[in-house]
Image (tube, grey):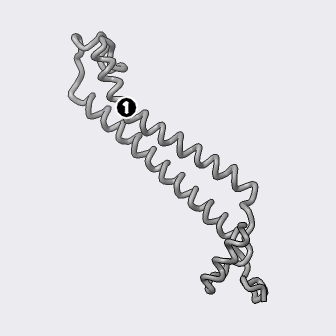
């Protein structure tokens, strides 16, 4: 069925030079899977880091120390003016690093797919490979 689709495509698009197609190499499949796992983990980490301020506020509202921001609870909280911006800057920096890692993982995935596509599509179409079989 796959070959028939290719023959029809070659017949409809005579300039198409993809004559022989093979299945992906076995060593590229686990590599793509591992990159997809890394992408999933990075997205999970981005969501977790983005939720840290919410968890700190929920902890403070429940009588806790706000994940270490206010020792002794909200009533006895004496923090400097720079604790909030420092936390915001640290979270922004971590999110920036995670987004860079996510972009790099997407780039690696596209490189692997391009290499796999280049391995799959090779050769040229000869006269006897046409749909009419002539």
Q: Nearer the viewer, residue 60 or 93?
A: 60
Q: Is residue 72 left or right of residue 121?
A: left
User: In the displayed structure, would residue 88 be above or below residue 109?
Assistant: above
- Sort mark 1 into few (<14), some (14-19) or many (20+) by Cα contacts within 10 Å: few
Which residue is identified by label 1? 51
Please state the horizontal and vertical placement of residue 42, each as a whole percent of the image.
50, 42
Residue drawn at x 23%, y 24% is: 80
User: In the displayed structure, would residue 111 be above or below residue 58?
Assistant: below
Q: Quadrant of the N terminus?
A: bottom right
Question: Which of the 4 image quadrants contains residue 60?
Answer: top left
Q: Quadrant of the C terminus?
A: bottom right
Q: Is residue 42 left or right of residue 91?
A: right
Please state the horizontal and vertical placement of residue 57, each as a whole percent of the image.
29, 23
Outermost residue on the front side: it is: 132
User: In the displayed structure, would residue 53 be above or below residue 1?
Assistant: above
Residue drawn at x 30%, y 33% is: 86
Numbered-mark total: 1
Please state the horizontal and vertical placement of residue 71, each as a whole percent of the image.
31, 13
Q: Is residue 121 left or right of residue 96?
A: right
- Which structural element holds mark 1? loop
Q: Nearer the viewer, residue 46 or 68?
A: 46
Residue drawn at x 35%, y 41% is: 92
Q: Is residue 63 left or right of residue 121?
A: left
């Amino acid at each position: 069925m796959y070959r028939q689709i290719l023959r029809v495509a070659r017949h409809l698009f005579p300039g198409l030079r993809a004559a022989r197609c093979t299945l992906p190499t076995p060593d590229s499949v686990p590599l793509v899977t591992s990159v997809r796992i890394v992408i999933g983990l990075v997205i999970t980490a981005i969501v977790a880091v983005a939720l840290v301020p919410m968890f700190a506020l929920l902890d403070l509202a429940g009588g806790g120390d706000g994940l270490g921001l206010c020792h002794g609870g909200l009533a006895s909280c004496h923090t400097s003016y720079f604790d909030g911006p420092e936390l915001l800057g640290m979270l922004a920096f971590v999110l920036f690093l995670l987004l860079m890692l996510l972009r790099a993982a997407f780039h690696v995935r596209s490189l692997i797919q391009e290499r796999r596509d280049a391995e799959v599509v090779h050769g040229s179409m000869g006269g006897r490979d046409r749909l009419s079989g002539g």
